[in-house]
């Protein structure tokens, strides 16, 4: 190390003098042993990391002295450049990309060094914008990784969001730094960082989904002049179903949909010539739906209803349970648990695509319970089978006890059980299982997270008729 009494300039001069002495003639290297050649190759990499880190610090300081808070009095601005990036490209002859890399690392180092200090211009307490990259900054300072590696980690990992925390990103950043030091090359690094982010996001999808479900709600209040107003906050699945129904009640009016059959086009023409505005139509249509729902036969199990949402999911994700699906048209990710539940009762078909986008196969087996089967299930069970629920069959979906994809369960009466929408969601998301014993009794197996002993809970039938029948049978 150079004496600390020397100024930065003097040390650069000394370093340049030393650099001038580096071998640059191929002749000299030709006479080197293989071992020496590989050794100087390694040393050269260390030297360029040292130069990279030194360059980043310079870029960081130029950026700091040209920060937006300084306005026209900033260093770059006074020199006639709009940004520090322009100044550095012009004065060093480096490419835009090289300057960006140096600036990214330099800004990171400067911000982390200034953490907690007060900006003398704005009076603000400074905080790093990417605190999760601390391990990366430390490794650049220690000349363990290059500034390009730092940039690859930073851009591959991205920023925290409601599902991925800064702490999680910091752990991933530290792991990636370790991999670089262990020899991971720069070409594969960005991909590794991106993969690390995706893994965090997969876990995050479930968290975000639960958060969005938690804030759902429908409220209303009276308007001073009469009438009222409703505010409906929807989770993504509800919103997808809602928009489907909304679009269908209003789209011919907006000229959005082409109708195929004669009947449909006549209906479209009727709606289009209707004097009502689209929002009025929607209001009337939804009230009609509410009335129809209130009139529904309470003894019939909920069918595969009209609104259709499409979810795309990779076959592999479905089978391994790792990954997520996407609500088509909304782009909203949904957890695999949710996809499994929609497959259990919802309106979906399974279509395979090869990587080229060609359709591979169509589902051949019956996955959804037919109307006839749902009638049988409604009579047999009499409503939602959760022990603490009293929802009638009309509120229920038919759940596959042995799940359709996971357990290759069949759509047979003996594999079906009605659960209300809420319990169906809970059973899939939280991992409740159902067991049928040899006497035909149903048992709920709570997940380990709810009951570590997983003690079976009886699920008595909700149908009086069948319960009576059983009592008679057992008495005789
Ligand atoms: Zn189900
Ligand atoms: Zn229920």
Image (cartoon, grey):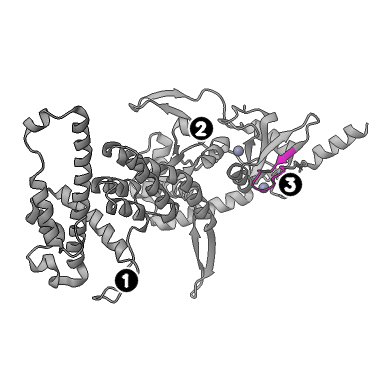
- Residue at image position (46%, 30%) is 315
- Residue at image position (52%, 58%) is 215
Nearer to us of marks 2 and 1 is: 1
Q: Which residue is mark 1?
A: 117
What is the quadrant of residue 77 in the picture?
A: bottom left
Nearer to us of marks 2 and 3 is: 2
Residue 345 counted in the magenta span: no
Front in this rendered view, residue 233 or 451: 451
Residue 354: % across, % down? 38, 25
Q: Answer yes or no: is residue 304 visible.
A: no
Crowd rating for badge 1 (residues with CA inside 10 Å; few <14, some 14–19, many 20+)? few
The magenta stretch is 443-454
Q: Which residue is mark 3?
A: 387
What is the quadrant of residue 72 in the picture?
A: bottom left
**Total marks placed:** 3
User: Looking at the picture, does residue 146 appear above or below residue 90?
Assistant: above
Q: Which residue is mark 2?
A: 320
For the N terminus, give its image quadrant: bottom left
Query: Along the horizontal axis of the image, is 161 left or right of 473?
Result: left
């Amino acid at each position: 190390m150079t004496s600390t009494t020397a100024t930065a300039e003097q040390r650069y001069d000394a370093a340049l003098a030393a650099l001038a002495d580096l071998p640059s003639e191929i002749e000299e290297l030709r006479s080197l042993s293989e071992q020496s050649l590989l050794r100087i190759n390694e040393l050269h990499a260390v030297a360029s990391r040292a130069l990279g880190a030194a360059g980043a610090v310079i870029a960081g300081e130029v950026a700091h002295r040209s920060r937006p808070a300084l306005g026209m009095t900033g260093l770059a601005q006074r020199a006639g450049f709009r940004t520090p990036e322009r100044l550095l490209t012009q004065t060093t002859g480096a490419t835009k990309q090289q300057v960006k890399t140096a600036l990214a690392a330099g800004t990171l180092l400067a911000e982390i060094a200034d953490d907690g200090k007060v900006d003398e211009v704005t009076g603000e307490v400074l905080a790093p914008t990417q605190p999760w990259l601390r391990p990366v900054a430390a490794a650049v300072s220690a000349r363990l990784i290059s500034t390009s590696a730092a940039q690859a980690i930073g851009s591959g990992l991205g920023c925290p969001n409601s599902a991925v925390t800064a702490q999680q990103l910091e752990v991933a950043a530290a792991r990636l730094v370790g991999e670089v030091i262990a020899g991971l090359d720069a070409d594969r690094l960005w991909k590794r960082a991106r993969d690390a982010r995706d893994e965090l996001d997969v876990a995050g999808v479930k968290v975000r989904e639960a958060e969005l479900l938690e804030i759902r709600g429908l409220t209303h209040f009276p308007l001073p002049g009469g009438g009222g107003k409703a505010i409906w906050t929807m989770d993504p699945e509800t919103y997808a179903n809602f928009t489907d129904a909304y679009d269908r009640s209003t789209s011919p009016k907006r000229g959005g949909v082409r109708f195929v059959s004669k009947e449909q086009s006549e209906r479209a023409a009727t709606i289009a010539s209707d004097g009502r505005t689209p929002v009025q139509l929607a209001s009337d249509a939804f009230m009609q739906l509410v009335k129809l729902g209130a009139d529904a036969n309470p003894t019939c199990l909920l069918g595969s209803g009209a609104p259709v949402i499409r979810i795309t999911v990779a076959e592999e994700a479905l089978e391994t349970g790792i990954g997520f699906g996407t609500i088509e048209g909304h782009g909203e990710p949904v957890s695999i648990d949710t996809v499994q539940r929609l497959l259990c009762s919802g309106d979906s078909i399974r279509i395979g695509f090869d990587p080229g986008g060609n359709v591979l196969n169509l589902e051949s087996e019956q996955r959804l319970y037919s109307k006839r089967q749902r009638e049988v299930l409604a009579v047999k069970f009499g409503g939602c089978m959760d022990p603490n629920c009293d929802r009638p069959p009309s509120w229920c979906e038919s759940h596959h006890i042995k799940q359709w994809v996971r357990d290759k369960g069949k759509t047979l009466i003996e594999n079906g059980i009605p659960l209300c929408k809420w319990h169906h969601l809970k059973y899939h998301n939280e991992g409740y299982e159902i067991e049928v014993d040899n006497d035909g009794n149903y048992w709920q197996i709570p997940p380990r997270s709810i009951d570590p002993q997983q003690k079976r809970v009886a699920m008595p039938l909700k149908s009086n008729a069948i319960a009576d029948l059983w009592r008679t049978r057992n008495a005789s």
